[in-house]
Image: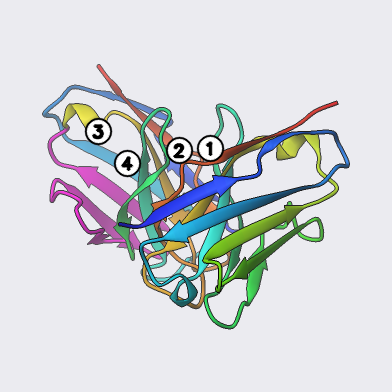
């Protein structure tokens, strides 16, 4: 059974930093592209970032480019999102999600974690 | 950036009725780079349809998707109680974006 378990969320001040983790199990982690998607309270989904399975190519939404860094440790089956220069508008539940088919260009997401809440506030 | 516009914003129907949800892209996303998700309150999204018209594993055949280019449709043929939720489309042909969602509520 595929499982994705996010951690690392919490309260952080504006301009602060935070690192999210997503521990994966139940599938060949290094064979799949992985993504982060966020959802502000009461709002819709926003794609944030993705990283391919083997080559480690990365992709970012314009809203986080230059501030967030996605990475993965295939030996630990873990996905990361390093967030810096955080803004109030980054407040959201952050979901880790697995690509259904691909280890390349990010596509449809067939398994999601339950999310971790990041609150940016002074 | 490709903007996805979903309509209607809210759809009020009864169990057993047919639902038709629309997703329109500001520019072509290709023939099949579109997915649909359902999100129930307090839960993570669930993939329903990928490549515009293919059902994800375990998704019942009352869900169907169609369209290409800029206009896509999700149809639920007979609504079940668990289908009343928020639905999102996602494109992954030109970068990656989600629509703003359609809320399907019980009439």
Q: Tell which tag, 3 or 4, sits nearer the viewer.
A: 3
- Residue B74 on the magenta span: yes
Secondary structure of residue under mark 1: loop
First in sequence, mark 3 or 4: give its number: 4
Which residue is identified by label 1? A44
Q: Chain of mark 4?
A: B
Please report, as a chain letter, where disc 2 is located.
Answer: B
Q: Are marks 4 and 2 in contact (CB under 8 Å)?
A: no
Circles 2 and 1: CB distance less than 8 Å?
yes
Indicate which disc residue B83 carries.
Answer: 3
Task: Work out whether residue B33 or residue A2 is closer to the camera in this orientation and state it.
Answer: A2
Residue B101's disc is: 2
Chain of the residue where label 3 is placed in the rendered structure? B
Q: Do tags 3 and 4 sit on the same chain?
A: yes
| A13 lies above or below B107 | below
Q: Residue furthest front?
A: A76
Q: Which residues are magenta?
A: B52-79
**Is B46 a magenta residue?**
no
């Amino acid at each position: 059974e595929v499982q994705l378990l996010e951690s690392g969320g919490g309260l952080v001040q504006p301009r602060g930093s935070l690192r999210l983790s997503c521990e994966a199990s139940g599938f060949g982690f290094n064979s799949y592209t992985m993504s982060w998607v966020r959802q502000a309270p009461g709002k819709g989904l926003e794609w944030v970032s993705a990283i391919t399975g083997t080559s480690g190519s990365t992709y970012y939404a314009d809203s986080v480019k230059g501030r967030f860094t996605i990475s993965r440790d295939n030996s630990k089956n873990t996905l990361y999102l390093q967030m810096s220069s955080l803004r109030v508008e980054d407040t959201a539940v952050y979901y880790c999600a697995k690509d259904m088919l691909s280890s390349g260009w990010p596509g449809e997401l067939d398994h999601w974690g339950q999310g971790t809440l990041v609150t940016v506030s002074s | 950036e490709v903007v996805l516009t979903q309509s209607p914003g809210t759809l009020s129907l009864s169990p057993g009725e047919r639902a038709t949800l629309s997703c329109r892209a500001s520019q072509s996303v290709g023939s099949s780079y579109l997915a649909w998700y359902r999100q129930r309150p307090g839960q993570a999204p669930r993939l329903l349809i990928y490549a515009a018209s293919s059902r994800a594993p375990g998704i019942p055949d009352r869900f169907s998707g169609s369209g290409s280019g800029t206009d896509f449709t999700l149809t639920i043929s007979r609504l079940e109680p668990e289908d009343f939720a928020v639905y999102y489309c996602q494109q992954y042909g030109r970068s990656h974006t989600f629509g703003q969602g359609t809320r399907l509520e019980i009439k």
